[in-house]
Image (cartoon, rainbow, N blue to C red):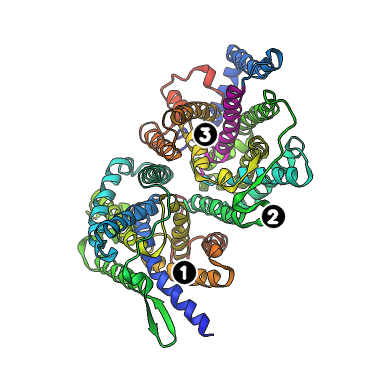
Amino acid sequence: MSTDNLTVAEIRGQRQVSVIEKKGGGKKELVIIGILLLALFVYPLLPVVTGSNHNYSLHLLLFAFLYIAMASSWNILGGYTGYLSLGHNVFFAVGGYVSGMLLASFGLSPFFTWPLAGIAALLVGFGFGFITLRIRRGPAFIISTIALLMLIRILFDNWEFIGGSNGISLPLIDLPVQLVKIPFYYALLILAVVTVYSSYWIKQSKIGLGLRAISQDEIKAESAGIPTSFYKILAFAISGLFVGIGGAFWGQYLTYMRPNIYLVILIAANLVLMSILGGRGTVAGPVLGAVILIIINEFFVSQFGGSELNIVGTGVIMLVVLLFFPLGIVGSLRQAGKLPKLLDWD
Amino acid sequence: MSELIQILLLGLALGGVFALMASGLTLVFGVMRIVNLAHPIFIIMAAFISYWAFTLYQIDPLLTIPVNMVVMFFVGIAVYKTVLARGVDKPGYVTITVLITFAVALTLDGLLGYFFSNNQRVASPAYATEAIFIGSFFIPKAQFYAAMVSLGLIGLVWAFLKFTRVGYAIRATTQNRSAAQLLGVNVGQISTFTFGLGIALAGASGALMSFLFSFFPAKHWEWIAILMSLIVLGGMGSLLGAVVGAFLLAVVSAYVSSFFGPTWSPITFYLALFLILLIRPEGLFGEKQEAL
């Protein structure tokens, strides 16, 4: 389940305590995070100044930013309410194709059209959430997210206008090769920061309280006057929004779009795994999970190559986490009372 | 008109096989509330057994059914014991088990893909190319045999549930787990056995899949959505529901396939799933689901 079995009142209590703690201590940690962020913001200036090529490290970092944003986004629904979406890359594809098609047809850069990609993802979230989230939690929602993924895959594979299964190629950004990744780097870094902050903000807000009440006991939450259906649908749409925006940049970054880049279940599986590895329902969890998993992934790919073994690795790690520490790293450490302040972002 | 009847026949033949594929899934859900996302990868695993038996030793896929069932029964029990048996009574078991079976599915998908590659395969016994004629209508022999075998097996399972003591206990556990336990049913053993039985049924369907549909490891994601739509339509946990859902949707998808092309026939199942969720989430024969 979610982090722990607290009642709503206890959650409220804990929330007040954590606010008080933040006022007292936590300054040092904020400074460390600030310095880290500053370093990440300054890092791409290195190739500009020295003229050297840092494309590999830039690629890894911006890949991490993308997944930090997407996993944190998944966590808003999957972590806070316990409604697991196993087809979340549908939003990735929707956002990617909206911006990608605008670029291919009218030459509009994703750096201007990303809000449209976000809105499209938001609308898909509202529409699909309206169908599947009005009933109480059950396996049906999870299954329907897989079905949605399959449905969109068939549609995109057969829709000639967007290139069908062969996809469509997109024009490069007109920049020297060692600088071409930098705009994407900043876009995705900002997206990651905004997503994580939104995830934190939502958790602290009244909606977040409602969402966590839903994860504990939906019937009680409903009788306590929480508009559960609306909150769930809203959470689903918001958690689609950031993934959609991430998709908008990803198409032009890769310079092509194909359904089998966006719409493979491994992406959705990775989002789920990152969240539960780091700690489902915590703010820092998905960030930590994304970073760890991308490092492991990079190691796997460099050692073994094959994408099939990648899938095995994802499955095995997920099994180990679920069986031995289902609360994830942050959740387990918190339960043991050993969570360093640096990782306590709730 | 005669064309419509022809399509109906083909749809019904397909429905029998779908029913067998979904029966294991619905049994496992009924007894343990486990949504076994790994069910189709077990079917594909068994399809590989039948496929290799046919390709290497020319053994008829239909004859491998008993072997498949025994092997997959023990595979099922092993999987249940190692990753699913813990924490059955804890809250959140449903959510955790969905993720666990998801992880099992990923792992097996990757392993099968690594060892056997993701090429499309299909076994082609002699009857795969022949057909049975009834007046002016025809049914391919492969689909006819498969449907008959499926219905026979489902009949056996139904009789087993209805008339044996273990079957009794399984039905009791499905209806009310804690009450069954109070009345002396060993719920733990029943769960283990049912999971084995469910996977054994997946094993039998695998033998049929090996010559009916071209398969490859990664295909199981499509199948999980299809099979789930069948049992959601029928009402999750209900064997009868799974059979009725299978026949209904198989027939509809056969019509969709012949009017709009085979690419679109899977869409029938996905759209049906959304429609059921929108209109009648508990399905045709299901009881209203409480929050799980």
Which residue carries the number 2 mark?
A161
State the residue at coordinates (56%, 22%): A18
Disc 3: host chain: A
Which residue carries the number 3 mark?
A281
Q: Nearer the viewer, mark 1 or mark 2?
A: 2
| Upstream in sequence: badge 2 or badge 3 | 2
Disc 2: host chain: A
Quadrant of image for the N terminus of chain B: bottom right
**A259 in magenta:** no
Disc 3 crowd rating (10 Å Cα; few below 14, some 14-19, many 20+) is many
Tell me which amino acid carries mark 3: Gly
Q: CA distance from mark 1 to mark 2?
A: 30 Å
Q: CA distance from mark 3 to mark 1?
A: 40 Å
- Please give the label number shown on residue B250: 1
Range of magenta residues: A55-84
What is the x, y in percent for residue B250? 46, 69
Tell me which amino acid carries mark 1: Ala
Q: Nearer the viewer, residue B250 or B141?
A: B141
What is the x, y in percent for residue A316? 38, 36
Element at badge 1?
A: helix
State the residue at coordinates (40%, 73%): B13
State the residue at coordinates (53%, 53%): A150
Q: Tell me whether marks 1 and 2 sit on the same chain.
A: no
Element at badge 2?
A: helix
Disc 1: host chain: B
Say if residue A214 shows up in the picture.
yes
**A70 in magenta:** yes
* Res B224 quadrant in image: bottom left
Element at badge 3?
A: loop
